[in-house]
């Protein structure tokens, strides 16, 4: 740590009630803006200078600001082992799995150390390591994809595959990219390479030259100051909200003596505000880090060929409006920690599934376990994850069964009554997830159960009752009613258009949470039966072969004796 650098943060901490480490973290996010502005001005033809600038900035944050020498060692070990595996076992099908297991195990050690230390006000290396696990495990898979024929790869894999291992300088710059070092967003190596070589900014020939994004001087990186400043302003607003709301709605409120004395609806509102206050911190942090990435140019995501408008959402990690206005569980989860969602989908869920086979129980289970372990080992995480899986199932049943009643059976357009459905589904989603995420904020098992008990476990009972409802004859009755309604309209009943069906990913887990735990359990039982039958078949085949060999030996012995 640089001499005297801690003094101003200690003085400010006493004034606003935050810890010095927390203030230094916000300072690092703000400092990334002028540093990103300088980084963008390094000549495009000098990528090695950009790498050196990035490495210097990352090391300054780790050592100059926090004195995290152990953290530097941790990141070095993870990076060196991953690069070594990619170099020595590049053509092995086991290489990306070995890298993944090592990275997760290495991170687990630090996660447990932080949990036992139980000092959330101190910034350690675990946050940066969680981001690095996503980047390096993806790196290992991208290297493995670079050894496969194109006909075995999806479009996503073709775009991200690494045909040649990067130089150590490029690799170090990718690892220590300072705007996203502590809190993300994570990104793939080919995105970093496209940015540092400026090939990312090549405009397709189909785009009208007059619609090309404006640049300064000879730089290929489009102007990004305005969108970055909007992100800066938004991030600071969320941080200001967090600092003010946390005075009244910290999670300790749910455990205090006052909480049980107010009415039930008031308790639900307070629980919702506790969750919202906790989310504002993440909204602020992720918005700030995204803004500095945009200012550096890495957030660039193409240009609209018609309007010429540049998209800067490549590294968007959070959509606050999407979360707070969500009318169903999938929308709520898909707009939260969006880059982790992508990582779990492309590098866990789809990688567990063999080629030309549909993802099933194993893929869902692997994704769930990975998501849970990646977050850490606090019991509160697992309470939230397990309950959220069942909430998703109940919400999906409601959406499929009740939503069509509020749509025109012929055109599938919303009826005038759908606004009541929208309000009811929004209230149900927000109230349910206020309960679900409470342990995620509280972390401790006993305290989480205490907070839940003070609102009578309402979301557990409503979720259980909903699942029981759709497991009863009521489901068949609702379907018959829908069929009758569509028949009277003179059309055939089809599943209503929803965000799930439009995305084509209705059954994929979000943040590792199963879309249908009941179906996954049935698939697990069926897979187990299939494996048992296969094993029994192999045993019988082996016995037949053994009997056949024994008969041949017996005949040979008889002939010999004769």
Image (cartoon, rainbow, N blue to C red):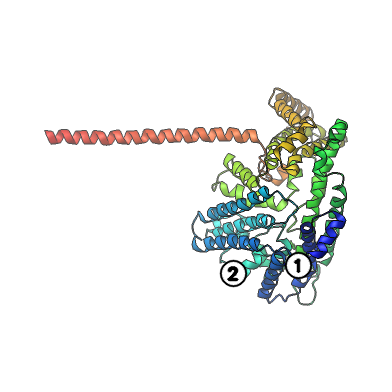
The location of residue 497, given as percent across then percent down, is: 75, 40
Residue position marked by numbered label 1 in the rendering: 296
Residue 84 left/right relative to 63: left
Tag 2 secondary structure: helix
Residue 442 left/right relative to 241: left
Tag 1 secondary structure: helix
Vertical comparison of 95 with 216: above or below: above
The location of residue 395, given as percent across then percent down, is: 74, 35
Which class describes the residues within 10 Å of circle 2: few (<14), some (14-19), or many (20+)? few
The location of residue 7, given as percent across then percent down, is: 80, 64
Q: Residue placed at 37% from the left, 33% from the top?
A: 540
- Which disc is residue 168 wearing? 2
Q: Residue furthest left?
A: 562
Vertical comparison of 314 with 399: above or below: below
Given this view, does label 1 or label 2 mark the residue nearer the observer?
2
Please tell me which residue lies in front, 286 or 533: 286
Q: Residue furthest top?
A: 473
Asked whether the viewer can see residue 495, the reply is no
Q: Quadrant of the N terminus?
A: bottom right
Q: CA distance from mark 1 to mark 2?
A: 22 Å
- Which disc is residue 105 wearing? none
Specify the quadrant of the image occupied by residue 410.
top right
Residue 552 left/right relative to 327: left
Asked whether the viewer can see residue 94, the reply is yes
Specify the quadrant of the image occupied by residue 562.
top left
Specify the quadrant of the image occupied by residue 546.
top left
Q: Residue placed at 70% from the left, 64% from the top?
A: 67
């Amino acid at each position: 740590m640089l001499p005297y650098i801690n003094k101003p943060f200690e003085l400010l901490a006493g004034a606003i009630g935050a810890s010095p480490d927390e203030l230094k973290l916000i300072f690092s996010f703000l400092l990334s803006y002028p540093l990103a502005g300088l980084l963008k001005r390094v000549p495009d033809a000098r990528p090695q200078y950009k790498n050196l600038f990035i490495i210097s900035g990352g090391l300054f944050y780790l050592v100059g600001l926090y004195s995290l020498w152990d953290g530097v060692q941790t990141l070095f070990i993870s990076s060196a082992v991953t690069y070594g595996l990619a170099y020595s076992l590049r053509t092995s099908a086991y290489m990306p799995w070995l890298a993944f297991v090592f990275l997760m195990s290495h991170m687990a050690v630090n996660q447990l150390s932080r949990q036992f230390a139980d000092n959330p006000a101190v910034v350690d290396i675990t946050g940066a390591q969680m981001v690095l696990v996503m980047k390096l495990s993806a790196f290992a898979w991208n290297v493995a994809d670079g050894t496969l024929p194109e006909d075995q790869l999806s479009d996503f894999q073709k775009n991200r595959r690494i045909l040649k291992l990067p130089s150590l300088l490029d690799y170090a710059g990718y690892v220590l990219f300072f705007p996203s070092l502590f809190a993300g967003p994570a990104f793939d190596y080919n995105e970093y390479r496209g940015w540092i070589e400026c090939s990312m900014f090549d405009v397709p020939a189909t785009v009208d030259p007059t619609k090309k994004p404006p640049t300064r001087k000879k730089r290929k990186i489009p102007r990004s100051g305005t969108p970055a400043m909007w992100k800066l302003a938004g991030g600071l607003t969320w941080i200001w909200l967090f600092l003010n709301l946390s005075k009244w709605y910290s999670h300790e409120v749910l455990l205090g003596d006052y909480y049980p004395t107010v009415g039930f609806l008031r308790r639900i509102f307070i629980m919702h505000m506790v969750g919202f206050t906790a989310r504002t911190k993440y909204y602020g942090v992720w918005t700030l880090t995204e803004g500095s990435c945009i200012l550096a140019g890495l957030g660039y995501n193409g240009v609209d060929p018609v309007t010429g408008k540049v998209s800067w959402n490549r590294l968007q990690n959070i959509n606050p409006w999407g979360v707070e206005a969500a009318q169903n569980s999938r929308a709520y989860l898909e707009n939260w920690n969006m880059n982790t969602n992508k990582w779990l989908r492309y590098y866990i869920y789809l990688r567990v599934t063999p080629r030309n086979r549909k993802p099933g129980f194993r893929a869902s289970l692997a994704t769930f376990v990975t998501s849970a372990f990646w977050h850490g080992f606090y019991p509160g995480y697992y309470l939230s994850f397990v309950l959220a899986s069942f909430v998703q199932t109940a919400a999906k049943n409601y959406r499929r069964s009740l939503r069509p009643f509020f749509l025109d059976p012929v055109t599938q357009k919303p009826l005038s009554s759908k606004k009541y459905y929208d309000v009811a589904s929004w209230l149900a989603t927000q109230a349910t997830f206020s309960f679900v995420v409470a342990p995620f904020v509280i972390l401790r098992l006993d305290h989480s159960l205490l907070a839940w008990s003070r609102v009578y476990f309402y979301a557990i009972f409503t979720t259980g009752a909903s699942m029981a409802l759709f497991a009863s004859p009521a489901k068949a009755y609702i379907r018959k009613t829908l069929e009758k309604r569509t028949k009277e309209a003179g059309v055939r009943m089809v599943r209503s258009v929803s965000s799930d069906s439009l995305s084509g990913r209705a059954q994929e887990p979000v943040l590792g949470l199963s879309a249908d735990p009941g179906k996954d359990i049935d698939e697990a039982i069926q897979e187990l039966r299939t494996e048992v039958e296969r094993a029994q078949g192999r045993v019988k085949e082996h016995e037949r072969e053994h009997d056949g060999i024994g008969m041949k030996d017996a005949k040979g012995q008889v002939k010999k004796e004769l």
